[in-house]
Image (cartoon, grey):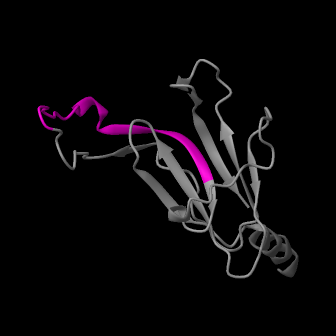
Amino acid sequence: MYKTLIPLVGVILSVPLFAASFNCPSEIHTDQALKEIPSGWKSFIDTKNEDHRLLSVSFYDGPPQSMTDLVPDNPGSNDPPVWTFSKAIGRAYWEVCHYADTSVKVTKQLPGSIKRCSVVYSKDSEIHIYVYRLIEDVICE
């Protein structure tokens, strides 16, 4: 009995303790409006632009409102971008999801146990949204 439990314990211990998804929603839906209509103009809602596709993912040192957008460890590389996070006490890192045709973003604080994240893009060069490649996966460990 113990011989069968030992491999099982090894498998359980090798699974990360966090199980949250780090993939951004592929699309968000917004209801945008002008705060003030300029004199002499009228506004209209372009309903075809209510759905906003995911364009990019970035990581911030602290809450995104602090505007501390981190540069990947390997800028300009053809490899997937990688961000490595230092473990300074009291420091929190955030994932930010950016969408087409809107300033609305969604964000999530990363668990303190995360040491690095990478973004995997589609290898299919025919699949592009604007000039961005489709994101296949966000891997954090």
Q: Which residue is drawn at 68% across and 41% down?
A: 120
Q: Where is residue 117 in the image (x, y as percent from the top left)?
A: 71, 55
Q: Quadrant of the C terminus?
A: bottom right
Name, please, the residue furthest toward the right.
3
Q: Residue at x 14, y 32 (%)?
A: 41
Above or below — where is 35 with respect to 75?
A: below
Q: Where is residue 87 in the image (x, y as percent from the top left)?
A: 77, 74
Name, please, the residue furthest toward the top.
126
Name the foreground residue: 68 vs 73. Answer: 68
Above or below — where is 72 with respect to 135?
A: below
Q: In this view, does 108 lie to the left or right of 6?
A: left
Residue stretch in magenta: 39-58
Q: Is residue 81 left or right of residue 26?
A: right
Q: Where is residue 131 in the image (x, y as percent from the top left)?
A: 56, 25
- Residue 126 is drawn in which quadrant? top right
Q: Which residue is drawn at 26% across and 45% down?
A: 32
Q: Quadrant of the N terminus?
A: bottom right
Query: What is the total number of numbered labels drawn onto the structure image?
Result: 0
**Residue 54 magenta-highlighted:** yes
Q: Where is residue 94 in the image (x, y as percent from the top left)?
A: 59, 63
**Residue 84 magenta-highlighted:** no
Q: In this view, does 119 lie to the left or right of 55?
A: right
Name the foreground residue: 84 vs 114. Answer: 84
